[in-house]
Image (cartoon, rainbow, N blue to C red):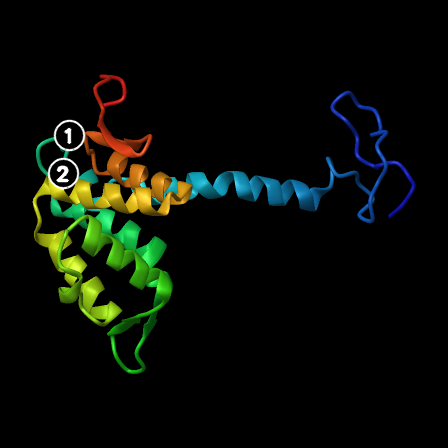
Amino acid sequence: MSSANCKAITKSGETCKLKANSSGYCHIHDPKKIAEYEAKQHLPEMFAVEVSAKTFSERRGLKPISEIIQIDSMNDALRNSLWNVLSANFFLKYSKSLLYSSDRIYSGSDIDVFIKYIWENYFKHPLDNLPSESRASVNWLLKYFQKCQWNEVYDFVEITMNYFRNPKLVEDINSVLERELAGYRFVGGVFTDITNEQEI
């Protein structure tokens, strides 16, 4: 690292008095550092636009835009998106695709312990009826998730969230709820109504 001063000119028109690094600039004025910082700042905004923007069909009025807050119901988009968050943050992490097949193998003690917990504490089924293979158990859970009542989806997600206690999971779930206009958010370990008009 050089002991010379940074060669950047400040907004006041004076030479920067901070020590320069190998680039000839200080850590504040280093062009490479500035570019990296700006890229990081724009990345979330870019992704947010891609996820939340209206589709071409919606912008052209060829496809209706849902503006109804989902309070006493749940459409397929919301249901599937909630499952995808759980799957991406847990089930798919522990799965392997079979060679030349779209099937997946779910394995690992984490999946087995979680499924046993859900089977025993949420469904309250006899443990003797628990499928012996993780793959069969996950497929059974998916079928249940797709067919159960809308309120039971929230029940299942809630007990799952409290089992894992993962801040990233909470953030992803609430992001889906907001995007799909659900009238609930996961706060303090439970799903709670959005009652504030500004929040809606």
Do residues under tags 1 and 2 come within 8 Å of each other at their CB atoms? no
Disc 2 residue crowd, few under 14, some 14–19, many 20+, Cα 10 Å? few
Picture coordinates of residue 95, whole percent (x, y):
33, 68
> Quadrant where the C terminus lies?
top left
Disc 1 residue crowd, few under 14, some 14–19, many 20+, Cα 10 Å? some
Q: Is residue 14 above or below residue 122?
A: above
Q: Is residue 131 above or below residue 148?
A: below
Picture coordinates of residue 59, whole percent (x, y):
21, 39
Type of amino acid at the residue the image marks with label 2: Gly
- The residue wearing badge 1 is 69
CA gap, disc 1 to disc 2? 20 Å
* Pair 1/2: label in front: 1
Sequence-first tag of 1 and 2: 2
Residue 52: which quarter of the image?
top left
Position of residue 147 in the picture relative to residue 23 (left or right): left
Secondary structure of residue under mark 2? loop
Type of amino acid at the residue the image marks with label 1: Ile
- Between 195 and 7, the one lying in front of the other is 195
Residue 108: which quarter of the image?
bottom left
- The structure residue drawn at horizontal position 60% and vertical position 41%, both measured from the top left corner, is 37
- Between 171 and 122, the one lying in front of the other is 122
> Which residue is most to the right?
3
Picture coordinates of residue 85, whole percent (x, y):
30, 50
Residue 61: numbered disc: 2
- The structure residue drawn at horizontal position 15% and vertical position 36%, both measured from the top left corner, is 65
> Which residue is most to the bottom?
100
Secondary structure of residue under mark 1? loop
Position of residue 110 in the picture relative to residue 135 (left or right): right
Picture coordinates of residue 163, whole percent (x, y):
32, 46
- The structure residue drawn at horizontal position 34% and vertical position 56%, both measured from the top left corner, is 90
Q: Is residue 99 above or below residue 68?
A: below
